[in-house]
Amino acid sequence: MFFVAGLVHTAYGALIDELIAGAKKEGVIELYAPSTLTPQGAQRLGEAFNKQYGLNLKLNFSPSGSMTRDVGKIVGIAATGQPQEWDVMLVHDGGHATL
């Protein structure tokens, strides 16, 4: 069991390293989240992310207008193989059922 846990930890660390490298290259995170997060909350979230991972990324906050509609849109885009509009989606509980 320890051996398997070690492999998972190594794979997870490599994935995080790849994500951080990609984020540094891109320089911007497109964030979709409930409008209740507010621009100020999104800014604080971005600052914490930058601090945690030693980055200096700009965070673009897109507040949800209709999360049910937008989650459906993402599912449709994924089905066609097109790139997504947002890098990160914070989805409420009801949105998870649609996904």
Image (cartoon, rainbow, N blue to C red):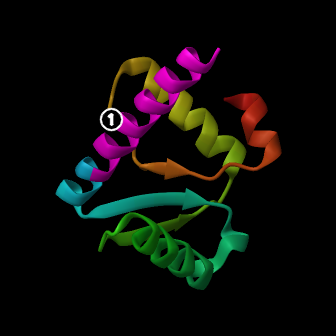
Q: Quadrant of residue 60?
A: bottom left
In the rendered structure, which amino acid carries the disc numbered 1? Pro
Give the residue furthest to the left. 25
Give the residue furthest to the right. 94
Read off the residue under disc 1: 83
* Residue at the (42%, 30%) spot, across then down: 10
Q: Secondary structure at mark 1?
A: loop
Is 46 situated left or right of 53 in this image?
Answer: right
Percent across and percent down for residue 75 are 55, 28
Percent across and percent down for residue 12 are 46, 34
Q: Quadrant of residue 51?
A: bottom left
Q: Quadrant of the C terminus?
A: top right
Q: Quadrant of the N terminus?
A: top right
* Residue at the (50%, 32%) spot, across then down: 9
Magenta residues, dominant SS class: helix
* In the foreground, 8 or 53: 8
Is 86 situated left or right of 95 in this image?
Answer: left
Magenta stretch containing residue 9, yes or no?
Answer: yes
* Residue at the (22%, 56%) spot, across then down: 26
* In the foreground, 60 or 47: 47
* In the foreground, 1 or 83: 1
Magenta stretch containing residue 30, yes or no?
Answer: no
**Start-end of magenta stretch:** 1-20
Q: How many marks?
A: 1
